[in-house]
């Protein structure tokens, strides 16, 4: 959907910098909830200076949280930071130098008497000036008015008839005959000294992941019963893994994150599309982590 919106904005020359609530967006900035902020601004067309300030602050706070690898990935992959490298090479080089240090020094990151809170406040004010609040029901309201007008013009079936907007006509009821499963699916086989302790489908149906007694997390092609080699990290044998048996798995609602718990009490959070471990909690429990579940917003995990 974000890609579709970006294409429409590019073709029409109109940028819809809108969100459900500007207050919520600025509150996320002031609280440092950068995952929510970056998701919200991704489809927007914002000034390069504001984007540079936003992404620079995210990198600095990642370094403050002792996440230099993630910070370096952003510096070398995020479009606003690549634009900074092209237009403001000294500013980008300063961030690279901060990321290369084995320690974080606030005086170097926030110079000139600036603090983390003042930087967040400046970014929040910049976004407030650029972003408008649009009620989430605005599109439904417009569709309702359009359908009402077409019905008055005799272009649609009479009121009370269900209308399929996508099909462009009266809705048809599809009746499917129920049938029981008569053919077994493929069988996934493990080695003689290994077996699966847990398995989970992602909510979007794109991933079937197993956790085995030898600590490996493997993503399977469930239609063929074979390991998915279209994922580069699995093709190169760089599998997701724990040091002990994997006892539990759980996906976020958007299927972008996978949490795994092992017998030695370790909890890890992965990106199954890339195999990257984005969070590691070495002492989540004194014993094995037997179940995991993401919150609805994907920002926390219960074990």
Image (cartoon, rainbow, N blue to C red):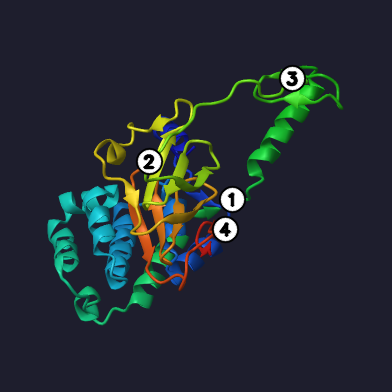
**Residue bearing mark 4:** 21
Of tags 2 and 3, which is closer to the observer?
A: 2
Mark 3 neighbour density, 10 Å: few (under 14) some (14–19) many (20 or more)? few
Q: Mark 4 against mark 2, which lies toward the viewer?
A: 2
Tell me the residue that label 2 is attached to. 192
Verify CB contact (< 8 Å) between mark 1 and mark 4. no
* Residue lying at 40% horizontally and 30% vertically, measured from the top left: 226
Q: Is residue 192 above or below residue 117?
A: above
In what element is the residue under mark 1? Answer: loop
Q: CA distance from mark 1 to mark 3?
A: 39 Å
Which of the two discs, 1 and 2, labels the residue nearer the N terminus? 1
Residue under circle 1? Answer: 134
Could you say which quadrant of the image residue 178 lies in? top right
**Front one among 298 and 281:** 281
Q: Quadrant of residue 163?
A: top right
Per the image, label 4 sits on a secondary structure element best described as: loop
Q: Are marks 2 and 3 in contact (CB under 8 Å)?
A: no
Residue that mark 3 sits on: 176
Q: Residue furthest front?
A: 192
Q: Nearer the viewer, residue 292 or 159?
A: 292
Q: Is residue 63 above or below residue 206?
A: below
Mark 4–mark 3 contact, CB under 8 Å?
A: no
129 left or right of 48?
A: right
């Amino acid at each position: 959907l974000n890609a579709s919106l970006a294409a429409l904005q590019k073709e029409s020359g109109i940028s819809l910098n809108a969100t459900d609530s500007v207050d919520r967006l600025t509150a996320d900035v002031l609280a440092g909830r950068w995952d929510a902020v970056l998701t919200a601004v991704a489809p927007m067309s914002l000034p390069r200076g504001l984007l540079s300030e936003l992404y620079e602050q995210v990198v600095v706070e990642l370094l403050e949280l002792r996440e230099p690898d993630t910070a370096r990935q952003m510096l070398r992959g995020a479009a606003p930071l690549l634009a900074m490298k092209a237009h403001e090479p000294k500013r980008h080089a300063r961030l690279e130098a901060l990321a290369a240090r084995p320690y974080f020094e606030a005086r170097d990151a926030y110079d000139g008497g600036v603090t983390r809170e003042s930087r967040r406040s400046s970014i929040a004010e910049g976004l407030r000036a650029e972003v408008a609040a649009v009620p989430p029901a605005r599109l439904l309201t417009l569709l309702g008015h359009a359908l009402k007008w077409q019905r008055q013009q005799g272009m649609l079936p009479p009121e009370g008839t269900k209308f399929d907007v996508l099909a462009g006509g009266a809705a048809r009821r599809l009746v499917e005959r129920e049938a029981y499963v008569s053919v077994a699916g493929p069988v996934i086989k493990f080695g003689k000294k290994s077996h699966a302790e847990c398995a989970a489908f992602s909510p979007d149906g794109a991933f079937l992941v197993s956790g085995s007694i030898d600590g490996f997390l493997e993503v399977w092609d469930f239609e063929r019963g074979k390991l998915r080699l279209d994922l580069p990290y699995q093709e190169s044998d760089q599998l997701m893994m724990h040091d002990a048996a994997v006892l539990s798995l759980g996906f976020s609602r958007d299927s972008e994150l996978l949490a795994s718990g092992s017998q030695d009490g370790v909890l890890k959070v992965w990106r199954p599309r890339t195999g990257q471990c984005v969070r590691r909690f070495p002492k989540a429990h004194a014993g094995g982590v037997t179940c995991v579940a993401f919150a609805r917003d994907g920002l926390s995990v219960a074990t």
